[in-house]
Image (spheres, helix red, strand yellow):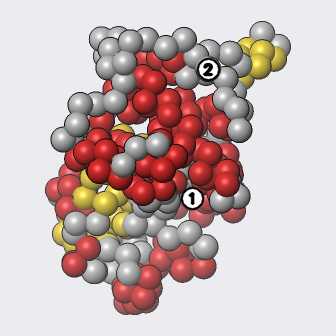
Amino acid sequence: MSFPLGRSGKPGTFPVLRQSTNNIQAFAETFIYPVHTVHNGRCEMNAKEELSMRISGEIVFSENCGKTIKKWRDLFGVSKTALANKLGVSTSVVCDYENGRRKSPGVNQIKKIIYALIETDEEQGSQFLRAYEKTFIGRDIKGDAILDIREFPSPVHVEDICDAVRGEIIVNQGHMNEEIYGYTAIDSLKAILELSSDGLLKVFGMTSKRALVFTKVSIGRSPFIAIRVSSIKPGLVVLHGVDTIDPLGIKIAEKEKIPVIVSGIEKVDDLIAGLRKIRV
């Protein structure tokens, strides 16, 4: 498999910029994929290029490079040993990168890590790349059902989200240390009316290891029924505005082993603000 090579800087030397979507894109286009297809005067990328750009940007601008590398390795389902074999290094080197015991990798090593993850995925049938293409490329979802959606550069724990929404975990309390890689906040009432089956799939973003935050919930039955029949299950459910939890919803959550948090925040805007303050 071949990849278009970008202009590399000196290993370990990165531009000093504030993190933003434009900065991530500028860096990645310079060092990872500087050449794209031009259509009607617009620069376009295929799924592999866009995914590579996203990974490179997150690693470079992350406050914890090692955790971000681990996040993507986990998302791709690649073991430390498999990644090490692809990179031609020992497993301990990968462990040291992820645990912060080794100096952050330079640009060339970041390229190799990204290429190794994607190449391994392709060898396994491109499962992650196909899922990314379906759920993330052109992810604009029409309507007002999706209030906010975010991918974390590195994982947070269920407990962190519980604190952010001033909530109480009511089901599967033993999962407080489970890792969560993002969240999607959904207007429950509008979702019922507006979201197609494709739209429902896209609320999961890049991974099912995310929190689905349902607002304007009455008793919580509808969200759990939707989760029960879905082939993808979230890593966490947050309920907002609920007065009484439906017993059936609790049974479904217990069966699916999904932790459930009831938020104590009254206003939706304050709930979103709390989620956005989660630091990774």
* Quadrant the N terminus occupies: top right
* Residue in the picture at 23% in, 31% down: 103
Dividing the picture into quadrants, the one containing residue 46 is top right
Query: Residue flagged by tag 2: what amino acid is it?
Result: Leu
* Residue in the picture at 70% in, 32% down: 2
Q: Where residue 5 is drawn, which disc sits there?
A: 2
Q: CA distance from mark 2 to mark 1?
A: 42 Å
Decide if residue 224 is on the left or right side of residue 246: right
Q: Is residue 30 above or below residue 246?
A: above
Inspect this view and state whether residue 91 appears. Answer: yes
Question: Of callouts 2 and 1, which one flags the residue occurring earlier in the amino acid sequence?
Answer: 2
List the residue tagged with mark 1. Answer: 191
* Residue in the picture at 20% in, 55% down: 160
Residue 196 image offset from top left, x and y in percent = 69, 58
Residue 67 image offset from top left, x and y in percent = 29, 45
Query: Residue flagged by tag 1: what amino acid is it?
Result: Ala
Decide if residue 262 is on the left or right side of residue 111: left
